[in-house]
Amino acid sequence: MRSRHMMKFAGLALAAGIAVVLLGRAAFGGATDRDLIRQAGELFGRLPKTMTSEKNPITPEKARLGKMLFYETRVSADGTTSCARCHPISRYAADGLQKPVGDSCKAGPRNAPTVLNAAAQISEHWVGNRTDVEDQARQALTSPAFGMPSNNAVENALAGIKGYATLFKSAFPGDVRPVSIGNFALAVGAFERTLVTPSPFDAFIRGDSTALTSDGKRGLSAFVEAQCAGCHSGTYVGGQMYDKFGIVAPYWRYTKSKAIDLGRFEITHDEADRYVFKVPILRNVAMTAPYFHDGSVSRLDTAIWIMGKVQHGEELSKAQIERIHAFLRSLTGVIPEEIETVPILPATE
Amino acid sequence: MRSRHMMKFAGLALAAGIAVVLLGRAAFGGATDRDLIRQAGELFGRLPKTMTSEKNPITPEKARLGKMLFYETRVSADGTTSCARCHPISRYAADGLQKPVGDSCKAGPRNAPTVLNAAAQISEHWVGNRTDVEDQARQALTSPAFGMPSNNAVENALAGIKGYATLFKSAFPGDVRPVSIGNFALAVGAFERTLVTPSPFDAFIRGDSTALTSDGKRGLSAFVEAQCAGCHSGTYVGGQMYDKFGIVAPYWRYTKSKAIDLGRFEITHDEADRYVFKVPILRNVAMTAPYFHDGSVSRLDTAIWIMGKVQHGEELSKAQIERIHAFLRSLTGVIPEEIETVPILPATE
């Protein structure tokens, strides 16, 4: 698994390296907006409409049911927790807390990232211990977050809400027993695979040179120049690889972390994975404070400064930070209309 | 206060009494749909578009801000609680719990009623200890539900979210210091005053005889015949008066109450108020289980049976219960489109 990702990473890094040279030249050699647009397009790529999966093709019925289940609290032990609790659309699908709070007030181990664009990542959760959004949705139910005692208990809870029977049946027409934990995961996954948020940066890449402010454009060049795009790579500006947090200095020297997190080492027990985390997607980052795996930093400019320090041993200037900040703001997307509406759930009887 | 309500009640009861006679005659004397429609219109009245208040006129700016604040968790001590937490639109603005759970997992003292149509009531909360929705919104923040230490702390929290400055200013253009707890209450109140949910029953009253099923029509007559409408009166089918829960038998003999609640006595210390609660609005009741002030009953048919028993000393037949149930389902309204969309909140920075 790891080696595959590393190869993928190597390929991306090579592409990024070439683009950095081009983009650096473009931005600092008096290049035109057109050059910058073309080169940003080559480096990051165009945003698709949905995040497809061969294993879980999106159908309207599945996505519609998944959206309902995303808001469903009756699949949590104390009836207080749904996916939407920690991923409220009103806050760009993140909860604003350092660490999420779920069933019976239990805090999660790491900051809850937004689910917007999350399905495009190599894996889910900060240490990649969920293979995809479907796996995340399924495992969440019997984790402390939802606190359900078993998959059976979840299935009984869903079967007890009569209105779901026909909805599951139409979403999974071939199934003998459509109301199942597996189909819960597929439906929520299908919904989450629609959560793509086109941003001004995407309009820029598509050719609209006015979509970025001049600070945003300078920030894009600064972002690439400072080698941020080496890891925060691809269409989603991150989410494609793992890396050590604190390559040149321990991260906790600069963050306000209350504890040292071993990161992916916890899962793999591989020394090379000590303090290794998934590189987060930066789309909508300006809307989803606080930052890092432990939510220990509340301001984005501080987070940018810390990244320069601990990943590159570089003291980014105030001007560099401001420009990168402006570029990151251009990654704040539009919440699609069909996501903005709340689904009305069936009654319990 | 009480006497005013009692007079209002007396007036309503008189009107209801006359209508009961008429409606009883209409339903059971072979009356036409037209008679039933006319008489239901006279008894319950037509639903307005919004629930206006001279003290707090609804403006688009105020209602828009109020909707955002309704979803705002940064005004709670632990950052987990907003109005929407206990009043999620996806569940008809009720939480499905026996008692609500707020800040730091503290349970509220009584079942959280829906906020849909709630602004039209004589007062808020089960025992009427909040004068109106504005008072409820204001006091909630420093109650255990949100757990904020003071009004000042709320105002500081709001002032810390820069994006709110212009929104408060445009909602309260005349104010020197628009970001205030008073304006929080007015904005949330203005939003809540728009939460009117037109139902099939309203279409019926407006003249569409097909809007109710034949069971629904029989249920309407049965509801009036069984004297439910004496207390669940007016356009909102309740919310207009207080009454003892358990007039002919203690309620806890039939409910699954874990404790005896003294009701309004807790507030007034008047012996006449022992076990007295506000008569709840029945609009959307089929969507907002569980029932009663302590959420101790999960099924609506059981709740109807209990009401017959403890309020009238009557054993409603299965057929009566089924018909009344059908009528109550016709009170399930449509969630207005502008309520169905989630507001996107300003970032913390």
Image (cartoon, coloured by chain):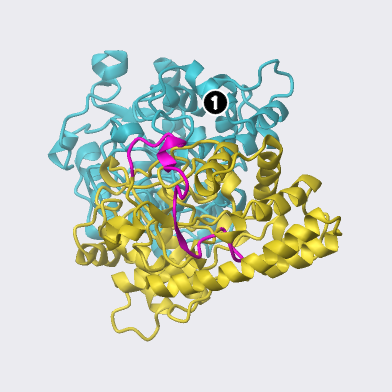
Chain colours: A cyan, B yellow
Spot occupied by residue A328 in the image (x, y as percentages of width and height)? 39, 52
Give the image quarter of residue B178.
bottom left
Observer able to see residue B167: no
What residue is shown with label 1? A185
Name which residue lies at 70% across and 18% down: A175
**Quadrant housing residue A231:** top left
Give x and y (percent) for residue A123. Answer: 44, 26
Q: How far across and how far down the image is residue B106, in percent? A: 28, 43
Q: What element carries label 1?
A: helix
Q: Give the range drawn in magenta.
A: B232-260
Image vertical order of residue B198 relative to residue B107, above or below: below
- Residue at screen point 41% across, 23% down: A148
**B21 relative to B93 in the view: left or right:** right
**What is the residue that sits farthest to the top in this orientation?**
A269
Please report the residue visible at 38 percent of the width from the left and 25 percent of the height from the top. A147
Q: Is residue B181 left or right of residue A77?
A: left
> Quick check: A30 left or right of B235?
left
State the residue in front, A317 or B260. B260
Placement of A238 over or under B109, stated as above or below: above
Other residues around mark 1 within 10 Å, as few (<14) / some (14–19) / many (≥20): many
User: Is B296 located above or below residue B111 in the figure?
Assistant: above
Give B145 or A135, whichever is nearer the viewer. B145
Q: What residue type is labelled 1?
A: Ala
Which chain is home to disc 1? A
Magenta span includes B233:
yes
Please tell me whether residue A285 belongs to the stretch shown in magenta.
no
Principal secondary structure, stretch drawn in magenta: loop
Q: Nearer the viewer, residue A328 or B177?
A: B177
Quadrant of image for the C terminus of chain A: top right
Pick whichever, B335 or A56, lies toward us. B335
Percent position (x, y) of residue B153? 21, 62
> Can residue A290 be seen at all in this image of the molecule?
yes
